[in-house]
Image: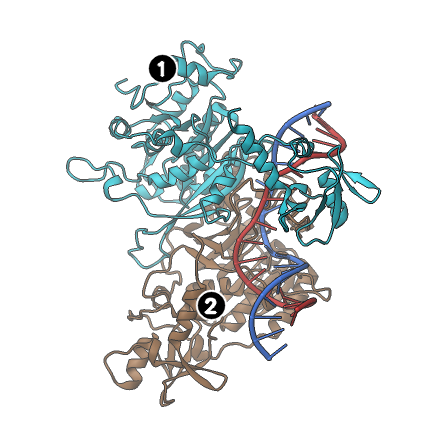
Chain colours: A cyan, B brown, C blue, D red
Amino acid sequence: MPIERAGVVRSKSRIEVLRTGISTANRPCLSPVENPLPLDQILLGDCVEKLNRLPAESVDLVFADPPYNLQLEGKILRPDQSQVDAVDDAWDKFDSFADYDRFTHEWLAAVRRVMKRHATLFVIGSYHNIFRVGTILQDQGFWILNDIIWRKSNPMPNFRGRRFTNAHETMIWAAKSADVKNYTFHYDALKAGNEDHQVRSDWLLPICSGGERLKNEAGRKTHPTQKPENLLSRILLATTNPGDVVLDPFFGTGTTGAVAKKLGRSFIGIEREAGYAAAAKARIAAIDPLPSEAIASFPNKRTEPRIPFMTLIESGLLAAGETLTDEKGRHEAVVRADGTLAVGPIIGSIHKIGALVQGLPACNGWTFWHFQRDGQKHPLDRLRIQLRESGKEPV
Amino acid sequence: MPIERAGVVRSKSRIEVLRTGISTANRPCLSPVENPLPLDQILLGDCVEKLNRLPAESVDLVFADPPYNLQLEGKILRPDQSQVDAVDDAWDKFDSFADYDRFTHEWLAAVRRVMKRHATLFVIGSYHNIFRVGTILQDQGFWILNDIIWRKSNPMPNFRGRRFTNAHETMIWAAKSADVKNYTFHYDALKAGNEDHQVRSDWLLPICSGGERLKNEAGRKTHPTQKPENLLSRILLATTNPGDVVLDPFFGTGTTGAVAKKLGRSFIGIEREAGYAAAAKARIAAIDPLPSEAIASFPNKRTEPRIPFMTLIESGLLAAGETLTDEKGRHEAVVRADGTLAVGPIIGSIHKIGALVQGLPACNGWTFWHFQRDGQKHPLDRLRIQLRESGKEPV
DNA sequence: TGGTTCTATGAATCTCCCG
DNA sequence: TCGGGAGATTCATAGAACC
């Protein structure tokens, strides 16, 4: 095995830390000590075989760029890489789809086992294979979160003029099952980086070319389908945290590893072709990780510490007896010393009372209710932010 | 052994169908004379049953908008607590993927039988169903020509902030089999109407709303998923000729029929719900077909237009059938639905026709041709500027 | 009448912590 | 595992309402 490690090699203690919390129950074959998570390495060999040697529930994200269907390449390979005779009638065409399906089924099941409970999966493909992949992953219980369209700003034109320019590829983003709700998704950061608008399911990005494209000595491209780093950046920034483990079972020339290293994530790459793996290793070794302040997490509203309304009063930011209104001044409520609001005889939380006065089933009291300072109305949330910021300062 | 998992286990009979085409057992044996093609009609009933009564190899194009098999749980509320009027109709309910696959397999096989040899098929769907559809149609021997992304310029946002905005739907365009080469595809006309650039596989179009959206007496939408006419226009203009027969097995409120009538194509619609069919019938009756010079075939030779003139028509800024003149009103031409101009029998880009009527070698159609509004003539360029200003595409 | 503001709504697999 | 409740969450467009 010429290449078992590439790029950054982590210390054992680091691995131990990252592996903490991984159950030993379902782990195949090897003990944790004998089989530590091979972080930031490229495993050379068949992906199913290599995956089966990894501990269960050990990675946070999977990015998979499997071989596209083989029907256009004139030859068909079985999962064991034996070649199927070239054929062109319906029976054999079906047979080739069945082969591709079996291959897909195997690697998806192997990947699924090593995913942590909250982990998610990206698979990229074209119309040749993506429908088979999508069907099979649904059959395995994966739960699709989005299909995402990579719109190529500079696609290869259609030379024969008999079809529309094939200007996109499709990615499927899926959780392990429908009941997984706590997957990582940096909604706030994505929105903030997109003119304060939600990021859509169609992404416009150029294909990989220029200096980013790996070439051999003869100037030929090293890999036929090298993915652009920007594509992987978006994915990793959106769905992982720094320190997370990203698995790529079809590593190729290592775009996933390069981007993971740059963004302070760990990677595990599996690649069958030694030539691709070697190119990936050299490429990743030359990557400088970004400074930590460039990749630190964007504040996430859902994970901010909760501030009880009462704390505002206790801290003196708001006084018991003050009158709150909505933004337009159409509704009023009085702040009570115990951290509740009163509208006439009715008493309740800022959310309950906000819902009540509007006749709605629910309401976010932090943004609905406003207090008055210097003749201007400000939302309660402003005081909450103030409190959180002051709490972070050293005392 | 029934079909348990599409793409994984196949029944023997399924393989038989794939090998031999349609088995004769299920084939209805009515002669064309006994069963003339019900052109420009809506057949009320189950689509498979109705399809089996149609003569084999009788339609030129199929547009299918099957149920998506959305699996909704509970309600979704907007941030203002209003409830989204979701698709919860009985026709979109399936017990399992296996059920949906069976349904898909049946209607696709029935559709396949009535397609002429050179006919093509469009199916539209979302990530909930499109992977199943794509897999099954590949299994049946259909040959995918493109997958086409309808990018919605105004999609519904994601209200919970846990996913990317689901801003597109996917269409699969397929021929009956891989050896069909003579399908209709108006490459030259499409290119001429698109700045002399090939049309890509991602199309930006708004959802159906405003006056085009059918509403009942109470002002509620008649159909939850009415498709925009511009979407069907592009499809019919690209892949059919005037006089062709377009089949829609899930007719709904008849967008396919309305566009077919407008563009001088015939249609056959099949719809199970009497209410939808009645709405479709009334809608189509009110359609005025475009004048024949606006839809006659684009000459099958290369031209050199330089304008996305087609976009003006799709955006509604200019209507197919309108007459353009030069500034002094000495020359006239008719706007065609495919983004070209006609002067008598001669058809070409706005530039070519402008040059022709003046007897000059070249002409800038954008400044030469004028349209009439409120009794005044304005150059086409005015509309182009308007469009550019409004056409800020989300990235 | 014209400009501005408000409101309704669209194929949607749409929360999460705590007791 | 289930239920309750805090509190988090929206963009483009049409058309009505208002000024």
Up-down relation of residue B279 to residue B286 (above or below): above
Up-down relation of residue A242 to residue A170 (above or below): above
The residue carrying pointer 1 sits among few (fewer than 14), some (14 to 19) or many (20 or more) residues within 10 Å by Cα, namely: few
Query: Which residue is more in the foreground, A19 or B240?
Result: A19
Q: Residue at x 43, y 14 (%)?
A: A16
Labels 1 and 2 positioned on one and the same chain: no
The residue carrying pointer 2 sits among few (fewer than 14), some (14 to 19) or many (20 or more) residues within 10 Å by Cα, namely: many
Q: Secondary structure at mark 2?
A: helix
Up-down relation of residue C7 to residue B373 (above or below): above
Q: Secondary structure at mark 1?
A: loop
For residue B218, side relative to residue B343 (left or right) = right
Q: Which residue is mark 1?
A: A11
> Which mark identifies residue B314?
2
Mark 1 is on which residue type? Ser
Query: Which residue is more in the foreground, A221 or C17?
Result: C17
- Circle count: 2
Mark 2 is on which residue type? Glu
> Which mark identifies residue B248?
none
Q: Residue at x 23, y 80 (%)?
A: B361
For residue A270, side relative to residue A380 (left or right) = left
- How many angstroms separate mark 1 from mark 2 (CA)? 61 Å
Q: Mark 1 falls within which chain? A: A
Instruction: Give how far across and how far down residue B122 sits, in percent.
Output: 48, 56
Query: Which residue is more in the foreground, B96 or B189?
Result: B189
**Quadrant of residue B161 within the rendered picture:** top right
Q: Mark 2 falls within which chain? A: B
Q: Quadrant of the N terminus of chain A?
A: top left
The reply to whether residue B32 is visible in this rendering is: no
Q: Residue at x 57, y 74 (%)?
A: B287
